[in-house]
Image (cartoon, grey):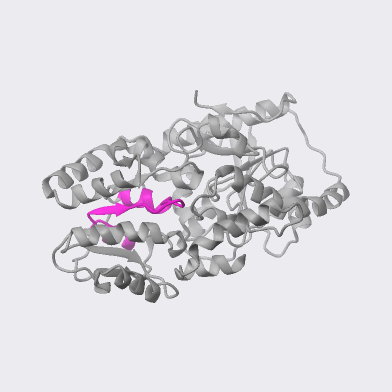
Amino acid sequence: MNSIGRSRAMCEWDDFACAAPQIRAALAMPDGPATPPFLLLSEPGITASEQRACSERWTAARLLAAGPLRASLNLRFDLTPRSRIRVGYLSNDFHAHATAHLLVETLEAHDRARFEIRAYSYCGAEGEMRTRLRAAFDAFTDISPLTDVEAARQIHADGVDILIDLKGFTHGARTGVMMLRPAPVQVNYLGYPGTLGAGVCDYIVTDRYVTPPASSAAYSEAFAYLPQAYQPHGRGTPLCAPPSRAAAGLPPEGFVFCCFNQAYKLTPFIFDLWARLLEATPAAVLWLSASILAEGNLRNEMRRRGIDARRLIFAPHLPQAEHLARLQLADLALDTAPFGSHTTASDALWAGVPIVTRAGDTFPSRVAGSLLHAIGLPELIAPDFDAYFEIALGLAGDPVGCAELRAKLVANRPTAALFDVAAYTIALESLFEAMWRRRLAGAPPAAIGAA
């Protein structure tokens, strides 16, 4: 199944339709192979329930192996009320990474009178963001040289009450630490848009748009609902003046559609839709994130659809501030499906660029819709892909209407819930307190948060 991941990263789509049946066949076999759960997030037609089944198939043997190791640790928890709840964040993204850019202001805003926050990092990347993050935590522990058992012992010895996994099943994750259960409450948050399966985390931080209550059976974790979008994003990243279009590699005129999602999120269906948009707007270009592996294939795919491949513009990687500056040159962001825009969506909205999305039924397909609700632009959430096309085409052909929409976005930005880091942090801390109260009372995890 790893060949599927390689094909997706390269946008090699000749056998694209074969993947979902292969995955379903493997899940249907009692002793079938375990598929990496991350692959299913971008696979069209795969349901949230199937994603849960995949996660639990993936973790079954690992949890079984973790049992004796955990027993050998003989972990006991101090379940007494205390003045400060001790929260540990586990990740290898404590550096200039999308997760860090989203979360850093929330970490800095934590109420230190009520919470002690600790980092458990297994990435050695240094730099300005790493320095800033070190200052944001009460303690910063590098567990890179430790085994999972040693890391779990350290977390337990530090008396962590709530351990938050920021990675899930993404690249480089150490979910094995979570499987040893070193903390009395464990939480799946931000880094992985889906369930980790039974036995790993007690709660998943989410919102009612991303995971409606009716979807709870597809998640092993109890829903911890934030009142607005589950994704944090502050107002602390300044927007510098945009460069010239020429400096950004864009033509001097013409509408600019953009999508800065990674290549594995692109699908033939979405590319068909984008090609139709370019065909209907002859002066427009499509601005994508550079990918050494995928660029040649994407140009070929555009030629197959009868579109001049030169209308694809690939943007090289830049530091965050420079990227946000150039992003302001785009006219409209286009979401992918079923794995939609997450950090790239909030970046676009912060830069004043609207995004059109079509929400599906899974967590990763609904994030952009959640963000649009939180910024006051639900009209950009299409009920189906025909409407998605019509919204995007209508904005491309209506300069006045597009300018008015962008002005509305910019006007909403200073007061919108999406960028209110103080209110967001208070709400997140309320969830932590509710989790801890339930644990102290001996109550099992249950849905908590916004009604």
Magenta span has 217?
A: no
In the picture, the quarter occupied by the N terminus is: bottom right
- Residue 112 appears in which quarter of the rendering? top right
* Residue 135 or residue 49, whichever sits in front: 49
For residue 393, side relative to residue 206 (left or right): left
For residue 59, side relative to residue 115 (left or right): right
Above or below — where is 33 with respect to 104? below
- Residue 48 appears in which quarter of the rendering? top right
Give the percent coordinates (x, y) of residue 361.
48, 41
* Residue 137 or residue 240, whichever sits in front: 240
- Residue drawn at (23%, 43%), measured in percent from left and top? 410
* Residue 107 or residue 53, whichever sits in front: 53
Give the percent coordinates (x, y) of residue 423.
43, 33
- Residue drawn at (32%, 63%), measured in percent from left and top? 322
* Residue 180 or residue 308, whichever sits in front: 308
Give the percent coordinates (x, y) of residue 414.
29, 38
- Residue drawn at (55%, 45%), measured in percent from left and top? 47
Residue 349 visible at all: yes
- In magenta, the rendered stretch is 322-350
Give the percent coordinates (x, y) of residue 382.
33, 41
For residue 377, side relative to residue 438 (left or right): left
* Numbered circles on residues, count: 0
Residue 154 visible at all: no
